[in-house]
Image (cartoon, grey):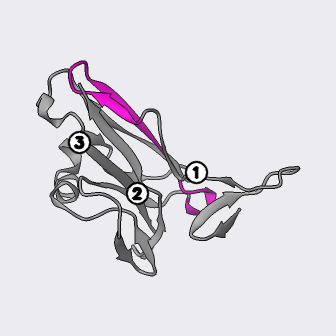
Amino acid sequence: MATIGGSIFRFLPKNDSPTPVHPLSSSTPTVSLLFGGTQTLQLDAGSAHAGEFFVMTGSASGVHPGVPLDGTVLPLQFDAYSMMLLEFAPTSPLAPGYGHLDGQGRATANFHVAPFQYSLMLSGVVLHHAFITFDANFGPSFVSNAEQLSFSI
């Protein structure tokens, strides 16, 4: 793997252009407010971060310019939604909000919406989520890309 312009790339044999590796990926970009649904988020910080503590957070305000963190940038705008996810992590719709990566540096989180759980007026609202890992000294060691979630009717 290599870093080019702030993005992580994995080089494959017989391939002239690098393939982007997204440490955070999702099963779907949209969840229905009427019928409910779940966006499954796959976290993959790589085996170099195996066992590290991770925290999921999000933003309802977008991704730019982001939050500077110890030489890197968390690609989220810190807002009230970010605070809610951090403060109420055990009961938020994004679970788990924190935990430890497995032996390969991976974890899974889910954003679950039950049918009619939220007002249909949220249709069109876009949220972004990302994760941060922390090393044994609790210093930030890895920041993911942001992944989008839109609400539809």
Q: Secondary structure at mark 2?
A: strand
**Distance of mark 3 from mark 1, alpha carbons?**
35 Å
Using the rendered image of the protein, determine whether residue 13 is visible from the camera's viewpoint: yes
Marks 1 and 2, how far apart in space?
Answer: 17 Å
- Residue 71: where, in percent of width, then height? 46, 81
Residue found at x 38% / y 52%: 99
Which marked residue is nearer to the observer: mark 1 or mark 2? 2
Residue bearing mark 1: 103
Which of discs 3 and 1 lies nearer the camera? The answer is 3
2 to the left or right of 15: left
Return the x and y of residue 6 as percentages of the image width and height.
Answer: 56, 69
Q: Give the amino acid type for the residue marked by disc 1 in the picture.
A: Gly
Q: Which mark is residue 131?
A: 2
Residue type pointed to by label 2 = Phe
Q: Is residue 118 visible?
A: no
Q: Residues within 10 Å of mark 2 (few under 14, many from 20)?
A: many
Tell me the quadrant of the picture where the N terminus can be found.
bottom right
Whichever of labels 1 and 2 marks the residue nearer the N terminus, that label is: 1
Work out how far the residue at label 2 is from the one at label 3, CA to CA, in angstroms. 20 Å
* Residue segment shown in magenta: 29-49
Check disc 3 and report its element: helix, strand or loop. Answer: loop
Q: Indicate whether 110 appears above or below 128.
A: above
Residue placed under numbered mark 3 in the picture: 125
